[in-house]
Structures are given as structure tokens and as C-alpha cells.
Image (cartoon, helix red, strand yellow):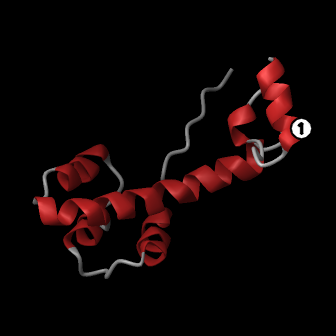
Amino acid sequence: MKYMQSKPKSEDIEPAIVNSGLKPTFTPCILLKKGVANHNLQKLENLPENELMKSFVLLLSLFRIPYMRRFIDEKENSGKWWYWDLSDNEKVEIIMKS
């Protein structure tokens, strides 16, 4: 069984910045443009406190893109309920009975 994760790709950076609503010149955006390698992402946590909310918004925007890719691929997978549409009461009942 292949273990898959929702990891961002380099091509997700620009859309994440646009979707975040942040100015591309903000420090977190500039750091993220250097790539999604862990050492670049770790630099975000070391920014001054006034940059942390921007970093948080940016990282949520970044995570959303690969999550949506996986959601589209997995939403009908009966073994992965966390991708199901949980606004569907029938699906919630199935989960509760499991």
C-alpha cells in the first residue's frame, strides 16, 4: 500500500499567494517563493510576531491546494471518510455506526 500525503508542490506557491489575499511583497510570501522545502517553511515560524498571522494565512492557503487535489481523488473512497462531504447526514450516520 502506497502512503500518500497532501503535500504542496512548487507550482502551488503562486496560486497560494494569490488565494491568501496577501501582498506578494510580504516577507512570508517572499520566503515561500524560495520553495516548499522544510527549511524554507521553518523560516516562517521564526519571523517576528507581527508576521505570524500572515504566515498562518499563507500556509492555510498553501495547504488548501494539495488538499483539494486529494479531496477530488478520494471523496468517493469508502475507506477515507475524512474526504467525504460531511454536510451529507447519511454519510455522517455511516461514520457514526462504524
The residue positioned 67% from the left and 47% from the top of the image is: 70
Could you tell me residue 78's position as x and y percent?
83, 30
Image quadrant where one finds the N terminus: top right
Report the residue that reaches farthest toward the top: 98
Work out which quarter of the rendered image holds the C terminus and state it. Answer: top right
* Residue 67 locus on image (x, y percent): 59, 50
Quick check: 13 above or below 39? below
Front position in the image: 36 or 42: 42
Foreground of the two, 1 or 53: 53
Q: Position of residue 48 (x, y in %)?
A: 10, 60
Among the 4 quarters of the image, the one containing residue 80 = top right
Q: Residue furthest right?
A: 90
Left or right: 98 with respect to 31?
right
The spot of residue 7 in percent (x, y) is 50, 46
Residue at horizontal 45 percent and vertical 78 percent from the top: 18
Is residue 62 toward the left or the right of residue 83 in the image? left
Q: Can you tell which quarter of the image residue 5 is in?
A: top right
Placement of 12 over or under 21, stated as above or below: above
User: What's the residue at 22%, 47% (across, down)?
Assistant: 42
Tell me the kind of residue under disc 1: Glu
**Which element is circle 1 on?**
helix
Would residue 88 be seen by someone viewing this image from the given angle? yes
Q: To which quarter of the image does residue 65 belong?
A: bottom right
Q: What residue is pinned by disc 1?
A: 90
**Can you see residue 78?**
no
76 lies above or below 8:
above
For label 1, the crowd category at 10 Å Cα-Cα, with few meaning under 14, some 14 to 19 and many 20 or more, is: few
In the picture as drawn, the residue positioned furthest to the left comes out as 48
Looking at the image, residue 10 sits to the left or right of residue 71; the answer is left
Task: Determine the residue positioned at 13% across, 59% down.
Answer: 49
